Amino acid sequence: MVVQELGWDSDVDETVRDAVEERSGDELLDEDADEVVDVVVMWWRDGDGDLVDALIGAIGPLADNGVVWVLSPKTGRRGHVEPSEIAEAAPTAGLSQTSNVSVSDDWAGARLVAPKAAKSRR
């Protein structure tokens, strides 16, 4: 599994990164990679810019059944993003939100897929 990481900064949860690398069996690709990827892990904080634009950029190298995970700080943490912001940005970028999860003490995740990928999983 090929995983690309976007939005890395010193505040990311290294335990989450390590777990993703272990699960994928390889190091995470950075934002400059040109490979087709199965998963995009996007660390997203309030103030990072336009989420729709970032999502459109993230799906460019995504495989047909690929998944984008938007990881954002939980409520009360610096950089918190309202879940409704992610839910509203996803369809504008051509994605569907399929689930929300807690990925660590400080980070929440929203799983986004292209609509045809969402249908194939039913």
Image (cartoon, grey):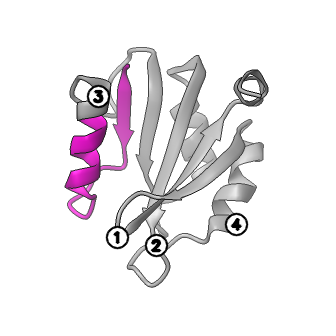
User: Which element is circle 2 on?
Assistant: loop
| Residue sitting farthest toward the front | 122
User: Which element is circle 1 on?
Assistant: loop
User: Which element is circle 4 on?
Assistant: helix
Residue at mark 3: 29
Q: Which one is earlier in the sequence, the residue at label 3 or at label 4?
A: 3
The answer to which of 57 and 109 lies nearer the viewer is 109
- Quarter of the picture containing the C terminus is top right
Circles 1 and 4: CB distance less than 8 Å? Answer: no
The mark found on residue 74 in the picture is: 2
| Residue 85 in the image: above or below residue 23 | below
Magenta region includes residue 40: no
Where is residue 9? Give x, y as percent.
26, 56
Mark 2 crowdedness (10 Å alpha carbons): few <14, some 14-19, many ≥20: many
The mark found on residue 84 in the picture is: 4
The mark found on residue 52 in the picture is: none
Residue at mark 1: 105
Mark 1 crowdedness (10 Å alpha carbons): few <14, some 14-19, many ≥20: few
Q: Indicate the quadrant where residue 53 lies.
A: top right
76 left or right of 8 in image: right
Q: Residue at x 20, y 60 (%)?
A: 10
Q: Which one is earlier in the sequence, the residue at label 4 or at label 2?
A: 2
Q: For the magenta stretch, what is the residue range?
A: 1-21
